[in-house]
Image (cartoon, grey):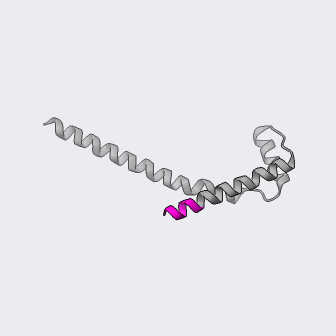
Amino acid sequence: MGAGRCCESDRAGAAKGWQARRSVLGIAGWLVPGTVLAIMPECPMCMAAYIAIGTGLALPVPTAASMRTTLVASCAASLAYLVARR
């Protein structure tokens, strides 16, 4: 057995592992922004309440409203980028 075969099989295994990770990251790239948009509350008071429950930090309603707008815009931009790249 030569050293060339051993190196070639290692490269093939590494390439398959990279392709699997790339596939998982591609799926996550679609799922994360879509899920965030799907579970996003519509009213700023609900957003403030969810943040308070999840983190223990109280936010004023205007801050929660601007956070919601920013989060919706970033998720929409991410999905638009994925659609354009596809």
Residue pictured at 33% horizontal, 47% vertical = 15
Quarter of the view holding residue 11: top left
In the image, the segment drawn in magenta is 80-86
Q: Residue at x 48, y 63 (%)?
A: 86
The x, y position of residue 75, in whole percent, is: 65, 56
Left or right of residue 53, residue 22 in this image:
left
Q: Quadrant of residue 10?
A: top left
Apparent side of residue 75 relative to residue 6 in the rendered image (left or right): right
The reply to whether the magenta stretch includes residue 77 is: no
| Above or below 40: residue 48 | above
82 sits left or right of 39 in the view: left
In the image, residue 36 lies at what x, y percent?
A: 67, 54
For this view, does 2 lie left or right of residue 19? left
The total number of labels drawn is 0
Residue 23 is situated, as x and y percent measured from the top left of the image, at 45, 53
**Residue at coordinates 77% horizontally, 56% vertically from top-left?**
41
